[in-house]
Image: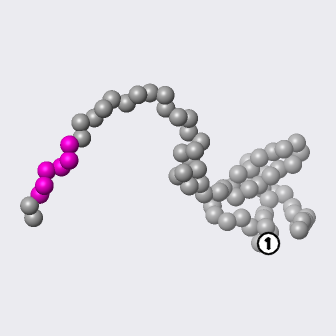
């Protein structure tokens, strides 16, 4: 379902801006703006999980030294 609406561009200081109509509002405080040819595409910033972030990291190719890790001493309460 494509929605379309004519909007006006205006100046906000030295920046060009567009008022986003209520039916097109994005969630949150931030968005991603990118240009593809003569089109501007505005998308909400997706919250990424820690697992998604870790999946983007390159694996480490190092050997870590063995660490002496004895069990803790018992504590008498």
Q: How is the image coloured?
A: one colour
User: Which residue reaches farthest left?
Assistant: 76
Give the quadrant of the C terminus: bottom left
In front here: 75 or 13? 75
**Residue 56 vs residue 61: left or right?**
right
Indicate whether 57 appears above or below 46: above
How far from the left and from the top, in percent, is residue 47? Answer: 60, 57
Q: Position of residue 29 (x, y in %)?
A: 63, 61
In the shown orientation, is residue 17 left or right of residue 28? right
User: Residue at 81% of width from left, 45% of height from top?
Assistant: 35
Of residues 1 and 63, which is closer to you in this image? 63
The residues colored magenta run 70-75
Q: Is residue 28 left or right of residue 13?
A: left
Residue 60 place in picture, x, y as percent: 49, 32
Of all residues, the one furthest to the top in this rendering is 62
Question: Residue at left 89%, top 68%?
Answer: 1
């Amino acid at each position: 379902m494509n929605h379309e609406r004519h909007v006006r561009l205006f100046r906000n200081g030295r920046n060009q801006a567009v008022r986003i109509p209520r039916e097109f509002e994005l969630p949150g405080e931030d968005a991603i703006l990118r240009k593809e040819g003569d089109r501007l595409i505005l998308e909400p910033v997706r919250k990424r999980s820690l697992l998604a972030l870790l999946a983007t990291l390159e694996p480490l190719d190092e050997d870590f030294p063995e660490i002496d890790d004895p069990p803790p001493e018992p504590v008498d309460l």
